[in-house]
Amino acid sequence: MKAILVDDEADGIRTLQKLLERHCPQVHIVGTAVNADSAGELIGRLQPDVVFLDIQMPGKTGIELLTEMGKPDFEVVFVTAYNEYMLQALQFSAADYILKPVDEDRLVEAVARVTKRLSEGEKDEQSSALLHNLFNAGQPGNMRLCLPTFKGFTVVKLGEIIYCEAERSYTIFHLVDGKTVTVSKPLLDYDNLLKGTTFLRVHKSYLINLLHIKEYIRGEGGQVIMSDGAEIEISRRRKDEFLVLVKDVFKY
C-alpha cells in the first residue's frame, strides 16, 4: 500500500512514519509533504493508495486540497487535533481519522479499514458525503449521514430520516420516501453520534427526528405521531427532556 504523509509539523511526520513502520508493515511510505501545494504535486506524481492528511495547515487546508482534486482516487486517513465540529463531520461520513497525539491502536485499526476498502472498492458516495460534511462542519442540519450497509454505504440527509428503530444489535432507519435502511450497529451508537442535532432518544427502542413530529399525545410518558403515521411511545423518564427540546426546536 503506497502512502503519502502530509503534516505541516515535521515532528508529526516523523512520529507517524515511525509508528507506521513499526506497526503497519504493509504501508510503504513513498513521500511526505509539509503543505497542501507540495502534497498535491506528490499525489499527482506518485499516485498513492492512501494519504495520511493533516486537516488544519497554514495557508491551504487539507479539506481545500481534497476539494481541488475533485473525487480523490485514493483513500484518506485524517490526522487532526481535537475539534468537536470537525470530528462530527468525519463521524457522520464514516471517515477514518486519528487524533493527535497519534494512538498506535487507532492507527492500526484505521489502516486495517483502509486495506479492506481498497480490496472491496467502496468509495464514491462516501467521498462525496465527506467533502460535503467537512464544508458544513458545525451545521449538523446540513450534513449527510453515511450508513454502512451489507452492500457498501447509503448516504442520507439528516432531514430525510424520520426515526431510527432498534432491532437487536441492528438499527433500522425509516426515511421520508418510505424506504428503510438497516445498519449493523446498535441504536446507542447513533444516539451518541446525533447528539446536538434535532434527534432525541425517546425510548430504548426509538430515536426520533423532532422535525418530523406531527402530533404529541399526553400520557404518563406520552406518544408522538410521526410524519409517516408511525406512533411512538415516549418513556416516562424521557418525557421532560423531550418537552424541553421540543420547545427549543420549535421556539414556542
Image (spheres, helix red, strand yellow):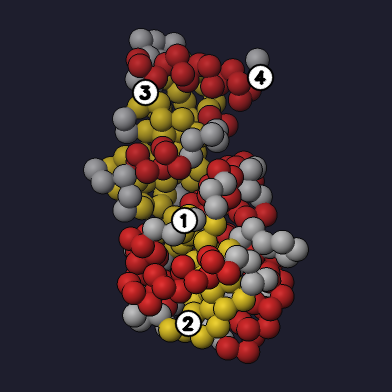
Q: Which residue is mark 3?
A: 233
Gap in Å between the C-alphas at discs 2 and 4? 53 Å
- What residue lies at 41% left-to-right and 42% top-to-bottom? 190
Q: Which mark is residue 251?
A: 4
Q: Which residue is mark 1?
A: 101
Circle 3 — which element?
strand
Q: Which residue is mark 2?
A: 29
Amino acid at circle 3: Glu
Gap in Å between the C-alphas at discs 3 and 1? 44 Å
Gap in Å between the C-alphas at discs 3 and 2? 54 Å
Q: Which mark is residue 131?
A: none
x then y, percent, for residue 78: 52, 63
Disc number lying in front (1 or 4):
1
Circle 2 — which element?
strand
Gap in Å between the C-alphas at discs 3 and 4? 23 Å
Closer to the chain start, of discs 2 and 1, is 2
Q: Residues within 10 Å of mark 4 (few under 14, many from 20)?
A: few
Circle 1 — which element?
loop
Which quadrant holds residue 27? bottom left
Amino acid at circle 2: Ile
User: Residue 176 vs residue 192: left or right?
Assistant: right
Amino acid at circle 4: Lys
Amino acid at circle 1: Pro
Gap in Å between the C-alphas at discs 2 and 1? 20 Å
Circle 4 — which element?
loop
Closer to the chain start, of discs 2 and 4, is 2
